[in-house]
Image (cartoon, rainbow, N blue to C red):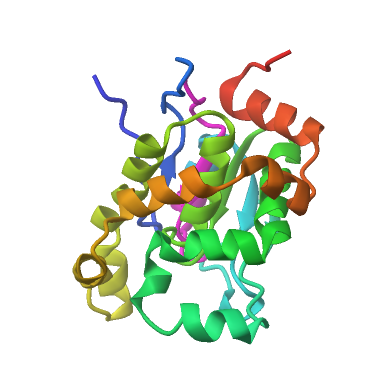
Amino acid sequence: MVRPRHLEWEGCFNARDLGGLLTTDGRETKVGAVVRADALDHLTAVGWQSVLAHGVRTIVDLRNDDERGSDTAPRPDEIATVHMPVDEIEDRAFWDHWSSGWQFGTPLYYKPHIDRFPRRSAAVISAIARAAPGGVVVHCGIGRDRTGLVCMLLLSLVGVAAPVIAADYELSHARLGPLFARRGEPDQGPLIAAFLEREGASAAEVIGATLASLDIADWLRAGGIGASDLVDLKARLLGEVDL
């Protein structure tokens, strides 16, 4: 029986637990350790109680300053929020290209982003590893692109295989239609699928190629992630540490 991973948090559309994913050495990621989600601003009071009940005590917000708005309902005092924008949006030489079309809605920009801004993505991984006891939510606006990049790195570091990571990424498309409807926008899923088809690729293929071409050791060094962070990350997501 497959354990349901989607979380029904009132006001969110694309929240799911990263627990229950098999690693290449036969272990399984812990339920309740890390949740990926769309923006939490629209959570209702009932939604926030669901977040608390799930054990979440830290939120890592990947959005830029100008994207954040006021919460619909009060954010519980028990939850700490850390703002860690990963875009480095002031680098126009990068973003004038990557934000100019549907490529930003796909994993095609992941490897260029990791190469260009290693410290941004690495800092988020370290923040998750060092978070206070309790679950961690990592989110951007819709929980697909920036969140997908971070979750790809996070899961790869604890030994989850590329096809499993890609399958998790694809789950967002089925959840985002209602979110776009709330915004009064067309569903991006079919538009992105058509774009990738024209590019002769699929999201799964791009994620696989990205991870295959990524020198994790170089990225860790460039990003400043220490050995203790990796130990803490494995302890958080796997409940055990390689000694």
Inspect this view and state whether residue 243 appears. yes
Residue located at (46% from left, 36% from top): 18
Give the left or right position of residue 108, taking residue 218 as reference. Answer: left
Which quadrant of the figure has residue 60?
Answer: bottom right
**Residue range of the region highlighted in magenta in the rendering:** 28-49
Give the left or right position of residue 105, taking residue 84 as reference. Answer: left
Give the left or right position of residue 164, taking residue 126 as reference. Answer: left
In the rendered image, the quadrant that contains the N terminus is: top left
User: Is 156 placed above or below 221 here?
Assistant: above
Which quadrant of the figure has residue 238?
Answer: top right
Q: Position of residue 146 (x, y in %)?
A: 51, 61
Q: Nearer the viewer, residue 169 or 91?
A: 91
Q: Nearer the viewer, residue 171 or 42?
A: 171
Q: Is residue 9 magenta?
A: no
Q: Position of residue 41 (x, y in %)?
A: 52, 65
Residue located at (27% from left, 71% from top): 188
Q: How many marks?
A: 0
